[in-house]
Image: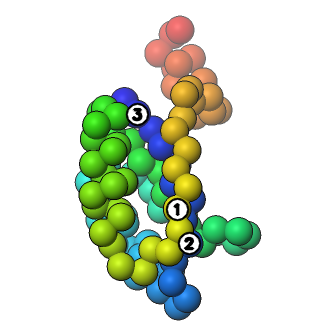
Amino acid sequence: MVTAIVLLNAARGRVNEVAGTLADIDGVSEVYSVGGRYDLVVIIRVPSNEALAELVTEKMQNLPDIEDTETLIAFRAQSRHDLESMFSIGL
């Protein structure tokens, strides 16, 4: 499983529409509207780097009203949720 975080800016007044469109794309697990330098944070979970490349460069890049993106690829996930699930199965 490949996880990526995409930080993006949408055209003025189009954040909600872009977020809704992104949320409907296969492989996009979450979309957050945020304050700060970026308008949206998109969490992508796909089976391979090839699937990530296709999603970002073919599906997202062709969407109107996305002005700028920065893609971060996650190497390892460490969260309270992951740790709790490991302990609940006896690891």
Name above or below for residue 66 compared with residue 26: below
* Residue at 60% across, 24% down: 83
Residue 2's mark?
A: 3
* Residue at 35% across, 63% down: 60
**Local secondary structure at mark 2:** strand
Mark 1 and mark 2: Cα distance apart in space: 7 Å
Looking at this rendering, what residue extends furthest in the bottom direction?
Answer: 13
Q: Amino acid at mark 1?
A: Thr
Sequence order check: which comes first, mark 1 or mark 2? 2
Q: Amino acid at mark 2?
A: Asn
Residue 69's mark?
A: 1
Q: Is residue 50 left or right of residue 75?
A: left
Name which quarter of the figure residue 84 lies in.
top right
Position in image of residue 34 (x %, y %) = 64, 68
Dots 1, 3 in contact, CB < 8 A: no
Dots 1, 2 in contact, CB < 8 A: yes
Which quarter of the image is occupied by the N terminus? top left
Residue 9's mark?
A: 2
